[in-house]
Amino acid sequence: MAVDLLAYQQLKSALDTKGTTLIAVSKTKPIEDIQVLYDAGHRDFGENYVQELVQKESVLPKDIRWHFIGHLQSNKVKMIAPFAHLIHGVDSIKLLEVIDKEGRKINRKINCLLQVHIAKEETKFGLDLEEAKQAATTYFNENKYTHVELCGLMGMASFSDDQQLVESEFKSLKQLFDDIKLAHKNAAQFNILSMGMSGDYLLAIESGSTMVRVGSLLFGKRS
Ligand SMILES: *Cc1c(COP(=O)(O)O)cnc(C)c1O
């Protein structure tokens, strides 16, 4: 399955006019596919699996901004800490503490998003709205997380054709994002709302997304 360069150019320019960042989700796809988008000028790529990300990072150009968008286990943080541009899936204060510890070891401040569970489905990871609010409060009120930059929130809507349901889930995340931003004077770097995938990115942008994570639309279906 080849990379759809036309779809990329159209999506990229549509998002650029709105100031929305495009993350090209390349999980399970070969490095050749990533190289095609890289050669077209793209730099932000998203991966879900630590081993796969580490392998790809080692062979691809160093100016790629790697986004880790999967579920991150504490014992694997150190493998991506040296280079991850943004970790989207932080779903506990415990994980945030591990990232902070690994960042301190290598003297690097690591950008993170809290993952919030907004979908109806049981299987998706993440904090619920109240837990996310508390985690953000802990981060912003205690000054001890010196090697983590909490940059915003990430969420996934239900995998559903029900537009109203999806929209209401996105809007609940946007509301939480605004509430957290407003509640903390030291949240100047809290600016990223990562929501929207191939099937729902338009709704996500309408609902206030600043960063979309798009895979199959660009790289074709995953097997
Ligand atoms: C796979 C994945 C995406 C991309 O999904 P597509 O439907 O292929 O665009 C986005 N976000 C996360 C967290 C993913 O795991």
Image (cartoon, rainbow, N blue to C red):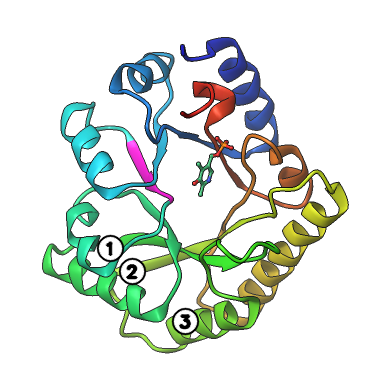
State whether residue 104 is above or below residue 33.
below
Say which element carries label 1.
Answer: loop
Q: Which residue is mark 1?
A: 109
Residue 159 magenta: no
Q: Residue lying furthest front in this view?
A: 223
Say which element carries label 3.
Answer: helix
Q: Which residue is mark 2?
A: 148
**Mark toward the start of the polypeptide (3 vs 2):** 3
Instruction: Answer with the quarter of the image where residue 175 lies.
Output: bottom right
The residue located at (87%, 53%) in the rendering is 164
Instruction: Answer with the quarter of the image where residue 217 lies.
Output: top right
- As shown in the figure, which amino acid type bears the numbered disc 3? Phe
Q: Are the residues flagged by discs 2 and 1 in contact, CB closer than 8 Å?
A: yes
- As shown in the figure, which amino acid type bears the numbered disc 1? Lys
Residue 194 image point, x, y percent: 57, 52
Q: Is residue 189 visible?
A: no
Bounds of the magenta segment: 65-69
The residue located at (29%, 75%) in the rendering is 146
Q: Residue lying furthest right in this view?
A: 164
Q: Nearer the viewer, residue 10 or 3?
A: 3
Say which element carries label 2.
Answer: strand
**Mark toward the start of the polypeptide (2 vs 1):** 1
Residue 158 image point, x, y percent: 70, 54
Q: Residue lying furthest left in this view?
A: 105
